[in-house]
Image (cartoon, coloured by chain):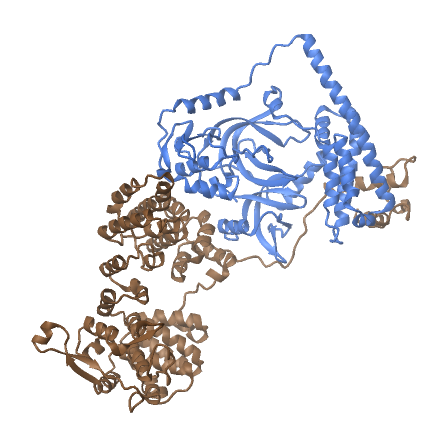
Amino acid sequence: MSSTNNILKEVLLIGTDRKPIPWDSLPESLRQKTQADQSDANHLLQVITYLTRYDNYNTTLPIQSNINLPEIITDEAEHEVNPQALSILGEILSQEYLLKNQLLTEWIDIVAQSDQTVPYEKILKLLDHAMNLNMATREKLLSIIGNKGRYVAQLMHADKYGGHKELDISQWDIANLDDRKKLLAQINKEKPVQANQLLQSAWPQSSIREKLSLLQVLSDNLQEENNIWLEEILEQEYKERHIKQSTARQCKLLIIAMLLRLNDPYLQNLIRSNLQAYLTKTQSAGLMKRMVGIKSTGINLPNDADTFWNGESMNSLFGIADKNNNIKLFDYDPQFWFAELIKITPWKLLCEIFESKSDDLVKYLIKDKSFITKIANEETPILIDAIVSNAHATKNSELISSIASLIDHPKCHELCALMNQSEFEKYVSRHKLFTQIDILASRAPSLEHNWSVHFSKNMISELLKICKSGKFRPHPKFGHTTARYFHPKAIDHLMSAASNFQNEHWYSTWKNNLVDPIIIGMRLKDALNQMKENI
Amino acid sequence: MNNWKLTPEQIEDLAPKATAYAAGKKLSNTLKWESYAKSPRALWGLIKGSGKKPYATQIDIQELAFKCSCPSRQFPCKHALALLILNSNEDLTPDSEEPEWVSEWIDKRRNKAKPKPAKDKTAEEIEKSEAGKQKRQDERKALVDDGVKELERWLEDMMRAGLLELPGKPQSYYSDMAARMVDAKANGLAGWVKALAKLDYTHIDTWHTQAVQIIGKLNLLIQSWKNVDQLSEDWQITLKNLMGWSQSSKELMQDKDARCIKDQWIILGQEKEVIEDITVLRSWLYGQKHQQRALILNFGTRHSPLENSLIAGTVMEAELAYFPSITPQRAIVKMVKEQLANQDLNMEPLSDLTAMQDAYNELCKTNPWYNNSVHIVNNCQLITIEEKWHLIDQKQQTIPVHSSFGKEQCMQWVLLTGNAVTAASMVLKNGTVLPLGIYKQGKYFSI
C-alpha cells in the first residue's frame, strides 16, 4: 500500500483543486470504495480513510540492525538490609539537612560494615540524598548498592559518583592529580615507605603546584617513615638555598615544618641555637616564684635585621618569606619572622627553648608588651594567629588546652573542633557561645551523646534566658544542630524549660524548633545504635 | 490484611503533590499525634492543628479512602499521608476498637457501596421518564448530526486546498471548528480537531503522516456516525462515547446487566495528565485469574481534587464493572474485598514486542479508534538509539519509549533488570510504549 500512499501523497499535499486523483494508478479495490456522485475532495477523503484503516491494523515494528546492546549487570546474592533499617532510613531522610547528613552518614557506615545491600527501590533516593556527603561516605554508599546501583550512579550523577574507582598502586603513573592525592593519602597511612617511592618517582615530572598539593596531603597524613624522603628532597632542592618563587618557597616551608614535627635533629638544633642567642631571663612576676628565685625566659627580638633575623637567612634556612607582609600587625620585620617560626616549630620544642610550661609560654607570647601592638587604638596581640596556626598544624593538646583556657579572642573559636570535650564545654560556657551554630556544629558528632549532661542542661538554661530577653529565637536549623549533640539525660530539663513560656507563640517556637528536633534526633540516634547491634 | 502497610514509595505516589508528601513525612512522627490506632478496617488518629480541636484523620484501609477534618483541599491531605507513613514505620496492631466517629464513617461507606433497591415507579412514571430521556437523546443527536455535516465539509475543503496549507493556518482555523463541535455537543470530535492543531508542523518529515492518520480516523468516525442507528447497541454506545457522550459511573454501579469481573487485580501503573485544567489519572489494571485488563479513570479539577484510591504495584481482590463498548476497557471499581499483601503473581506475558503489535492490530480491526492498550510483554530490553530510549526484543524489533517515561524511571528499569531481557507491562500509545512495571520471578514491580 505504500506505493499507493506515494501516488496520493502529492494530491493530498497540494489538494484536489490543483491535482486530480490519478484513478488509473490506484488499485481496483480502492476505486470500488468510492461512489460516482462524490466530489474529488470527498473521494480523496474516503480513500485516505480506507488506507489509514488498513495501515493501522497492519503496523509492523522496525527492525534495527547493528545495535550495541548494553552490558548486562548482575549482582551477587547479598543480604538486603532489614525493613527496620529501611524504616530508620526513611525517617532520617525526612530530617533537616544537618541532622540528616549526620545520621545518613552513620546509617551508610553501619550498613557498609555489615556487608549488606540496599534494596533497589531505595537506591535512586539514596544517591540523591547522599550527593552532598563527603567523598568517603559516597564511596561507602557505592559499596552497599551493588553493581546495578553503581552502574546507575554513574549514569545519573557521574560528577558525584563517577570518580569511584578502586585505586591501587599500579595506577599511580597514569592517575590524575586528584587520584594521586587520594592514593597517596591511602598508601601513606598503611605503607609510608611505598608512599615515599611514589613521591620519588612523581617528583621530577610534577609541576610546582602539583608538588605543593602532594606535600599538603603528606602533611595531613604524616608518618615517621616519611622522614627519609623529606630529608632527601630538602637536601637536593632546597637546603640553604634562597628560593625566589613563592610556591616553591611554600614547598620548602612545608617540608621543613614536617621535618620539625618529625623531630629532625638538625632543624631543631638550628632553631634552638639561633633562638637561644636572643633569650633573656627576667624575675618572675608571681610572688611565690619570686620567693623561690624562679626567673622567666623571654626573647629580645631586634628592631632591625641582623645576622639571623634577616630575609636572606629566613628564606634560605626555613623557606620563610623575605619580607614582612603584614606591616599593620608587625612593627618590625623580626616580629614577623618570629611569628612565622612559631607556626612551624613544634610547641614542645618551643617550651623547651623557653624553659616554660605551655600555659606560661602562651601567656608570655600573648600578654608580653613586646608582642602587643595598637590597631585602631586597641591593644592587639600580634602572635595569636601564629599560635592558633601552630595548634592547627601540630594538634598539640597542651597548646590547645592553654589557648582554650587563657585566650579570649574570636580567632580561637576555630580551635573548638580540636578541643577535648571538657575544654570545649568550658570554652563555650565562658564565652557564652550557646547560640553560635557554627561553633556548636564544628565538632564531629557521633552516635554517642557528645555533650555532658551538665553542659546540655546549662545550655538550655542559658538559651532560655537569652530567648526571654528577646535576643534569640531558636530556628529549626538550630534545633537540628543541637539534636546532634544533646545528652538524653537532659531531656527532662528541656521539657520543663518549655513551661517557662507564658506566651503561646514562644512556647510553640521553643517546642517546634528545639524540643521536637532534639527528641527526634535522640530517638533516631538510639535507633541507629540498636541497628548497629542487630544488623 | 492485618499487617497491611504501604511502602514509602507507594505513599509518595499517592500524594497529590511532592510538597504534600514532604509535609506528611514531617507529621509522621508519633510525637505529633495525640492518639493513633488501627483496626482491621481502619486507621485513624488525632493530630493538633492550628485550631483548638485536633484534626480527626481516618483511613478506610479495606477500600482505601481518606477523611480528615482539616480544611485542606488536597486529597489525601498531609495528615492522612502522615498517618500512612506512621503506619508503615510503626508496628501498629490492628486490634483497637474503632471510636464512634470512625465506625460511623466506615459503616456509612459500606452501606453506600451496596446497591440501593430501585424506587418502585409506576408504569406511567417509567414511560414518562423513558420518553423524556429519548427526547433529550434525539435532540442531542440532531445537534451532533449538524456538527458532523459541518466537520465533513471542513475536511473536504481541506482536501481541496491540500495539506500543505495547514502549517500556515492560524490557530483560530482549528479552535473555531473545535468550538463549533463543542456547541454541537460533540466534544469527542472537538478533540480530534484540537489534535490537528497540536501537530508540530516544524517536523516536515512527520507532520503530514500524522495529519493523515488523524483525518482518516476522524472521517471514519463521521462516516460511521451516519449509520449509527443501524448498528448494534454496543457499537452505538462506542460511537456515542467517541462523539463525546459521557458515561455515568453511578449508573454503571447500579446496572445489574453490566459486565463485571471479580479477580485479583494488579494495579500495573498510573499515568497522570493535565488536559485543559482537568487532571486525568489513568490506572491500568490486570486481573491475574482471567488475564483481563482494565482502565480506571479519575478526574480532578481546580474545584474538586483528584481522588485516588489505587496504588501502583499493589494487588486487590475486587469486582470491576466495565462500561459497555465494542472493546470494553474502561471500568470502575465496584467492590473491594480486600487489599492483598505481597504475594506471588501469575501473569501471562506475550512472547515479544511483535506479538504485542499483532495483538494491538487485532484490537484495531475490531475498533479502529482503539488507543492506549495495555500489554504484558516478554523479552524486552531497554536501550538507547540516538540518545532516545527504546524497547527492543530478541528479534531486534524496536519501539520508542513514550516521552513521559523519564530518566529516573529508566534508571529504575535498569536497577530492576540490570539491562537483561525481562517481562514488562506497558501501554502502547500512538506508536510509542509507556512502560508501567517489570514482572520477574512471580513478582511485579511498578515503575
Whole-percent x and y of residue B416?
49, 49
Residue at 85 percent across and 43 percent down: it is B159
Query: In the rendered view, does B272 fall on the left or right side of A242?
Result: right
Whole-percent x and y of residue A376?
36, 72
Residue at 90 percent across and 48 percent down: it is A19
Residue at 26 percent across and 54 percent down: it is A451
Whole-percent x and y of residue A436?
34, 57
The residue nearer to you, when weighing A505 against B405, is A505
User: Is there any visible trace of residue B442 in the rendered image?
Assistant: no
Of all residues shown, which one is farthest toward the front? Answer: A377
User: Is there any visible trace of residue B272 in the rendered image?
Assistant: yes
Colour of the chain lettered A? brown
Question: As displayed, is residue B136 above or below residue A334?
Answer: above
Q: How many marks?
A: 0
Query: In the rendered view, does A188 fall on the left or right side of A426?
Result: right
Whole-percent x and y of residue A220?
33, 71
The residue nearer to you, when weighing A441 against A7, is A441
The residue nearer to you, when weighing B444 against A360, is A360
Of all residues shown, which one is farthest toward the left? Answer: A292
Q: Give the chain coloured blue.
A: B
Of all residues shown, which one is farthest toward the bottom? Answer: A307
To which quarter of the image does residue A299 belong? bottom left
